[in-house]
Image: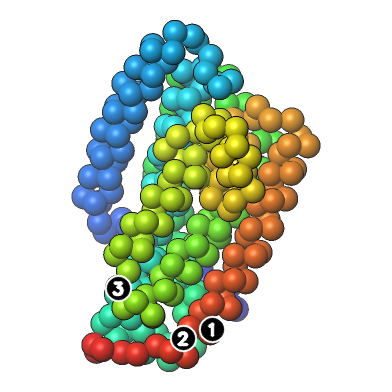
Amino acid sequence: MRLRKYLTFLRAGMIEMVQYRLSLFIMVIGNLLYLILIYFLWKAIYASAGTDLVNGMTFSDTLIYLVLATAMFTFMEMYSVWEIGRDIQSGKMVLNLLKPMKYRTYLFWSYSGTLVSHFIVTFLPTLIIVRIVTGDTIPLGWNLLLFLCSALMAVVINYSIDFIVGTICIFTESIWGINIMKQVIVLLLSGATIPVAFFPEGLKTAVYFLPFQSIYNTPLTILLGKEPPENVLWMMGLQLFWCLFLGAASRLFWNHSIRRITVNGG
């Protein structure tokens, strides 16, 4: 019965996305322009390096990784930080707290439909096109199933980080600057803009133990199928740890912070 309630939110989100087709079209065009930019940028980087292999990755490997990272960002981003900030600033949070479903759960499932829709409409076509163009670069096997499990944990990690940052709005009553800083940190340290393989050795070692690389680098590394099974299990185990730890931390931080909420609007 409870699952049926959640699936209702998922269905509503998918219907909402269909109603805003122009927004989806603009997002796709924006991603294409970004991909053209990174193509020429990394082509210039490899040309200046004077070698076909940089940090263990060829130009083709790097481009495939970044194309998939861009497509993954499209369906992973939930914009829940802005939603929490608006609810607090407008006073709508009071009404949300009166609902029978916990706010953290309600917010996650209200975005789930959009997440699933973007996965189907943007990521899957991108993956299929990359597979057709590059041949056997992306293997078709257990890596796909493990990627789906890893991507699901990445969603939970990303949402938990967003929820913690959004909760800070209770204290600051403004979220813009904090969220921009969070986005820069996540996009840089997760491998979404620069593959983690290109980081300096010391920074790379530190990043592997942070939760950010579990959002993009881990799922994409698993999908590309170039790591041995023991490394994959280690990465997914670390991802599961951050999934549970950040989920618990965001819940505890919210339960503590909500006692201090003040409403200026509404």
- Where disc 3 sits, the SS reads loop
Would you name the residue on which mark 1 appears? 255
The disc label shown at residue 258, or none: 2
> Is residue 77 something that shows in the picture?
yes
How many numbered marks are there? 3
Amino acid residing under circle 3 = Ser
- Circle 1: is it few (<14), some (14-19), or many (20+) Cα within 10 Å? few
Image marks 1 and 2: residues in contact by CB distance under 8 Å: yes
Identify the residue shown where x is 23% and y is 45%: 26
**N-terminal of the two: label 3 or label 1?**
3
| Relative vertical location of residue 35 with respect to residue 160 in this rendering, above or below | above
- Give the image location of residue 24, x and y in percent: 28, 48
10 or 241, which lies in front?
241
Image marks 2 and 3: residues in contact by CB distance under 8 Å: no
**N-terminal of the two: label 2 or label 3?**
3
**Real-space CA distance between mark 2 and mark 3, rounded to the nearest whole angstrom:** 16 Å
- Where disc 1 sits, the SS reads helix
> Is residue 32 something that shows in the picture?
no
